[in-house]
Image (spheres, rainbow, N blue to C red):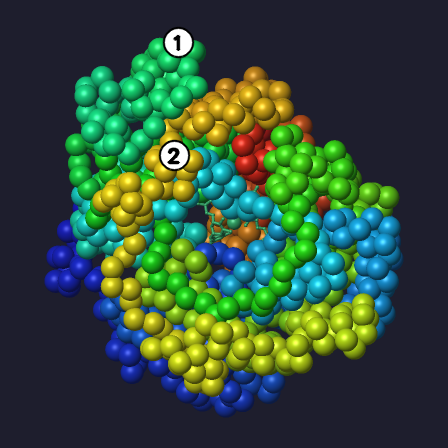
Amino acid sequence: MHSISRRQFLQWSSALGGSVATATLLPLPSMAESKPSLPSKTYDHVKWAGCTINCGSKCPVRVFVKNGKIDHIESDNTGDDVYGSHQIRACLRGRSNRFRVYNPNRLLYPLKRVGKRGEGKFVRISWDEALESIATKMKEIKEKYGNEAILIPYATGTTGAIMNRCTSGPWMRLFSQFGGYLNYHNSYSTGQIANGLKHFYGTHVGSDIMQIEHAKLVVMFGNNPVETRMSGGGTGYAYKVALEKSGAKIIHIDPRYSDSLVGACDQWIPIVPGTDGALVAAMAYVMISENLHDEAFLKKYCIGFSADTLPEGAPKNGSYEDYVMGKGDDGIAKTPAWAETITQIPAQTIIDLAREIATTKPCYIAQGWGAQRHSNGEQAARAIAMLAIMSGNIGIEGTSTGGREHSSGWVEPAHLPFKNPIKDSVPCFLWTDAIVRGKEMKDITDGIRNTQQLKQNVKFILNTGGNCLLNQHSDIHATSKILEDESLCEFIVDVNVTRTSSNSFADIILPDATPLEQEDFVRSSAGYSNDMPYIIYSQKAIEPVGECMSVYDMCTKLAEKLGGESFKQSFTEGRTQVEWLEHLWNLKFKDKENMPSFAQMKEMGLYRLPQVKKSFIAHEKFIQNPEENPLKTPTGKIEIYSTTLAKMAQTWILKEGQKITPLPEFTEAKEGPLDPLRKTYPLQLFGYHYKGRTHSSFWESAAIREINPNELWMNPIDAKERGIQTGDDVLVFNGYGKILLKAKVTPKIMPHVTTCPQGGWYKNKNGIDVGGCINTLTNLEPTAIAKANPQHSILVEIEKYRG
Ligand SMILES: Nc1nc2c(c(=O)[nH]1)N[C@H]1C(S)=C(S)[C@@H](COP(=O)(O)OP(=O)(O)OC[C@H]3O[C@@H](n4cnc5c(=O)[nH]c(N)nc54)[C@H](O)[C@@H]3O)O[C@H]1N2
Ligand SMILES: Nc1nc2c(c(=O)[nH]1)N[C@H]1C(S)=C(S)[C@@H](COP(=O)(O)OP(=O)(O)OC[C@H]3O[C@@H](n4cnc5c(=O)[nH]c(N)nc54)[C@H](O)[C@@H]3O)O[C@H]1N2
Ligand SMILES: [Mo]
């Protein structure tokens, strides 16, 4: 495979004569030149809007409107080309938003189901009829089952918005005022790392990615910011800038040669998915054997590295050191040779990596969320963090925590206020279980929170801005069966801008307005934008197409149907959407230094705050003074041995084969490399977050689809064994289903592992998913601790499709 190292890249760029410190290789036009040359055509106006879909970057775009229709979209043309006051250039998806507005499957009117659930047959109805039937059903469900039977499931389609936000917007306010709904906790993004590192550091947040500028060595586990935080506003750009500033060596540990390695990576260490915990244990073995670990650090800040810091009640041989050196209960020494057979990383590479990390300071160690989205993900997340603490690389300049990078710059107006009177909460991934057996679900069996047991099965679903009812959830066939059955969940309302595989299961579909068709704030993402904070005001470029309506307006009308004028009044407090925006802005920013007024914001569209002065270093204060600044763990220290987890291991009722361990041990994963099921399905598969989509979003744009194929990467060794060549149609299958994809044979994926972009649009044709949705192949068994989605742990077989 041809790739160039970052050193070569830096040499080449300095040969060009330009400064590589702040960095562009190609000379860019001056600001004046980069302004759009207005216009040989005449436009009605050019308006700012923001892209609110959940990619981790939320970008401003400028919408050129002609005769009431969007003519085209351009990116930010303000700011300059120096990092910190730079242009927030949108990626191709952001610039393609026009195609989402005018997509042939765009929802234009409220729809009512006429066929069977899931059949996808709908007729147009009036807003009045749609809202009337929803209100009637809501009252009926409330009366019959109580508000605990109502769920607004996990969804991320409009997380960038403030008023139209799917996770804390008008639906939550309305349903709270109606008596409440069942809450969820966790996310599909970070369930395992958040719950794993909570028992380790008390939080899962790492340092700002800009800390790389002070590092000598950078080690990334399953982290792809260039693709997952694209655009000028995202950490992907900061990553490149920081690397260029520091000149640090960078190593990526990932089964796949991702976009973040291209032109940046000094060393790629492919690893068998789901085995990061084994790699780390063997590196610990090397460090302990060669006395390279930071013993003083481990004694001062941590619980349970060696026997002398074990908490009361822990077994005498229960320390991490005992586990690693073979004195723990399993009696296995975690030697590099032991790890080589599991991870497929040569023992010598493991030894070298351990030595290099232990002897290079500062070393920035971070993980993305790929390693944790596995069936043993909590363990992997905790294990990776061990490297940062064993080498004392934490709390000081140029380091992180082994968690995911965070950013320091982030501001947003207040959110729409609401208070759900119901506190009961279900892990977000277990909503299908909550439909089938909600009343049986307990804290110790299913991770239910704020109550010991759920009171009701879910009977009513309002899905807004999400495709998790089907496409993005696991085991599409099993999930379809649950949703089809009207005796289980009795009513499903879906609010979207387009037809999706999820809303095929709705009873009523409501057509929302996009951010280009309504006024709203758009926030730069918490933690994932680079450290130049900004806020966007979407100025409403066009009138909503068809009969589309903003969520706030539809909720206002529904409020009236639910409880007349007085209920409507308590919902709106007499404010229109724009009046709320002004109110929410003023709650946070009125008369604040350096902040514009609401009127100025509305006019400007995009406001850039100054770059933050000092980028965030995670746990800095704790390291400086651990007594005064304890962590949010029960002991206030870093808990390598967690007494909380030890207790859970004893009291929780787990699925067969599952294990909770107080230490960050390597545990075998369901559908991982050591699962006996591999005899039948010998290849590991995982989906990755793709530049051609945000999950399933943007696939409705044919232009985007064409340049980003939905292809399956296969190593030449596996392809040859199966007679498969690039461009062949291949059937990827296991016990859950079959999907059709085009093969790409490439050494960018390691042998016996295959990968495809997640988020393909599920489309069943004679039992084969010809849309190539990876969730046709994933399973519904949650992880042990978080009860989260193990969607990267998949075993499959692949064959050439012969039609
Ligand atoms: N363009 C784009 N950007 C996005 C999204 C999108 O869909 N498209 N989605 C957004 C959302 S909601 C989220 S949550 C984030 C997701 O961000 P992540 O969860 O970090 O993204 P993934 O692509 O799932 O995984 C990151 C990397 O982990 C690697 N990996 C997989 N399994 C393992 C393993 O066992 N060990 C190791 N070491 N590496 C492994 C993958 O090859 C991949 O390169 O991205 C956000 N950004
Ligand atoms: N196998 C596998 N499955 C995964 C993942 C994985 O890595 N592998 N990743 C998981 C993760 S991390 C996440 S976050 C989830 C994401 O899952 P989802 O939150 O379902 O993400 P999307 O597929 O982008 O769906 C967003 C929906 O919002 C709609 N939408 C867009 N704009 C608007 C709007 O203005 N108004 C309204 N009402 N709707 C709008 C879009 O049309 C789309 O249908 O997927 C999870 N599923
Ligand atoms: Mo996510």
Residue 179 shown left or right of residue 696 in the figure: right
Label 1 beta carbon less than 8 Å to ligand 1: no
Mark number displayed over residue 635: 2
Where residue 558 appears, as percent x and y from the top left, is 77, 69
Q: Is residue 791 left or right of residue 469?
A: left
Q: Position of residue 202 (x, y in %)?
A: 41, 41
Q: Is residue 740 left or right of residue 526?
A: right
Q: Could you say which quadrant of the image residue 559 lies in?
A: bottom right
Near-viewer residue (284 or 581): 581
Please name the amino acid that badge 1 sits on.
Answer: Gly
> Are there few (<14), some (14-19), or many (20+) residues within 10 Å of tag 2?
some
Q: CA distance from mark 2 to mark 1?
A: 28 Å
Residue 277 lies, in percent from the top left, at 40, 27
Q: Is residue 445 above or below residue 431?
A: above
Ligand 1 within 8 Å of disc 2? The answer is no
Q: From the viewer's side, name the closer residue of 594 and 49.
A: 594
Identify which residue is drawn at 52% across, 25% down.
647
Q: Is residue 672 above or below residue 699?
A: above
The residue under label 2 is which amino acid type? Answer: Thr
Question: Can you tell which quarter of the image residue 638 is in?
Answer: top left
What number is the disc on residue 331?
1
Residue 222 position in % (x across, y down): 40, 39
Vertical side of 59 occupied by 398: above or below: above
